[in-house]
Amino acid sequence: MSSEHYRWLLVDDFVEEFNAHMAQAFAPSEHMCVDESISRWYGQGGHWINMGLPMYVAIDRKPKNGCEIQNAACGQCGVMLRLKLVKTATEESTTTHVHNDGLQHGTAVLKFLVAPWRFSRRIVCADSYFA
């Protein structure tokens, strides 16, 4: 197993549990916001490290290298509702094409992020990436 694959395994279960919990435990307002954010990785790194994820520091501008997280949040209080980690380009194209029902990539991601609240008559705001 590659160190990159191992490091993602450390957070995949957390993201799945977070998404399941928020879908059941939190009722968002009538407005939801969907966007992507990027956190640059600092600390341990390199292809040979197999010790877990390095610490990260969020910075104002999008870094050249970092972890992209696509997310949905409550438009009124800003509570994060659902996360989707973007890993490698290969995995992203494979997982997106399997469940996209013929939709463009950004629309398929948007559909995933708001799936627990579909048919709830909420207004979703997103930028052109998700069009």
Image (spheres, rainbow, N blue to C red):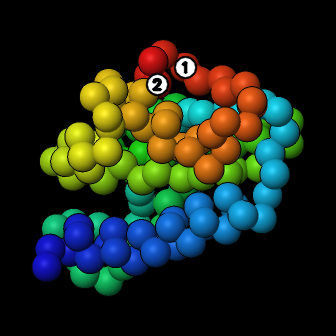
Secondary structure of residue under mark 2: helix
Give the residue drawn at x 16%, y 68%: 47
Residue 18, x across and y down, in percent: 61, 67
Which is nearer the eye, 31 or 24?
A: 24
Can residue 81 be seen from the camera position used here?
A: yes
Can residue 92 be seen from the camera position used here?
A: no
Q: Does the residue at mark 1 contact the one at mark 2 (Cβ under 8 Å)?
A: yes
Q: Which label number is shown at residue 127?
A: 1
Residue 122, x across and y down, in percent: 75, 31
Residue at far front of view: 119
Vertical placement of residue 24 versus 84, above or below: below
Residue bearing mark 2: 130
Residue 27 falls left or right of residue 113 = right
Q: Which label number is shown at residue 19?
A: none
Residue 36 falls left or right of residue 9 = right
> How much space separates mark 1 and mark 2, taking CA atoms?
6 Å
Give the residue drawn at x 56%, y 33%: 35
Vertical placement of residue 92 versus 14, above or below: above
Residue 11 falls left or right of residue 117 = left
Give residue 24's quadrant in the image.
bottom right
Residue 94, x across and y down, in percent: 19, 48
Which part of the image, by quadrant, shows the N terminus? bottom left
Secondary structure of residue under mark 1: loop
Q: How many marks?
A: 2
How many C-alpha atoms fall within 10 Å of the one at disc 2: few (<14), some, or many (≥20)?
some
Residue 73, x across and y down, in percent: 69, 42
Give the residue drawn at x 36%, y 49%: 86
Residue 87 falls left or right of residue 57 = left
- Which amino acid lies under the numbered mark 1 shown in the image of this protein? Asp
Vertical placement of residue 7 versus 35, above or below: below
Give the residue drawn at x 76%, y 41%: 74
